Image (cartoon, helix red, strand yellow):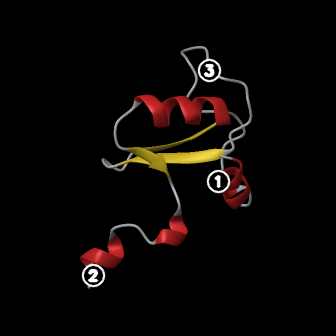
């Protein structure tokens, strides 16, 4: 989690976690996660960890890996 936060620190992102409950989480957004449907959100370490453990197909988003585009355009 710390490595992901460090790797994504320079990316433009919202100030606060987008994964909190209805009132919203006031913790700093540190890590971007995504799912296989193409939805993504920035979250604090606690909420990102919770989402990865409890939601199927959620993963830490990483633009450096190139995603599916490289496979589709081969």
- The quarter holding residue 9 reads bottom right
Image marks 1 and 3: residues in contact by CB distance under 8 Å: no
- The secondary element bearing badge 3 is classed as loop
Alpha carbon distance from label 1 to label 2: 27 Å
Residue 35 in percent (x, y) is at 38, 46
Q: In the rendered image, which residue does mark 3 sit on?
A: 24
Q: Earlier in the sequence, mark 2 or mark 3?
A: 3
* Mark toward the viewer: 2 or 3: 2
Where 60 sits versus 72, above or below? above
Q: In the rendered image, which residue does mark 2 sit on?
A: 73
Q: Earlier in the sequence, mark 1 or mark 2?
A: 1
Depth check, front residue: 39 or 52: 52
Alpha carbon distance from label 2 to label 3: 39 Å
* Mark toward the viewer: 1 or 3: 1
Depth check, front residue: 6 or 23: 6
Image marks 2 and 3: residues in contact by CB distance under 8 Å: no
Residue 27 in percent (x, y) is at 73, 29
Tell me the residue at 61%/14% (across/down). 23
Tell me the residue at 69%/34% (across/down). 16
**Neighbours of disc 2 within 10 Å: few (<14), some (14-19), many (20+):** few
Alpha carbon distance from label 1 to label 3: 22 Å
- Residue 58 visible in this rendered orientation of the protein: yes
> In the current view of this chain or complex, which residue is farthest to the bottom?
74
- Say the numbered circle drawn on residue 4: 1
Quadrant housing the C terminus:
bottom left
């Amino acid at each position: 989690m710390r490595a992901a936060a460090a790797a994504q620190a320079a990316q433009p992102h919202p100030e606060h976690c987008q994964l909190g409950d209805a009132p919203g989480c006031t913790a700093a957004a540190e890590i971007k996660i995504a799912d296989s449907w193409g939805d993504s959100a920035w979250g604090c370490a606690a909420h990102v960890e919770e989402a990865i453990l409890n939601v199927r197909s959620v993963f830490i988003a990483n633009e450096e890996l190139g995603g599916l585009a490289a496979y589709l355009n081969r």
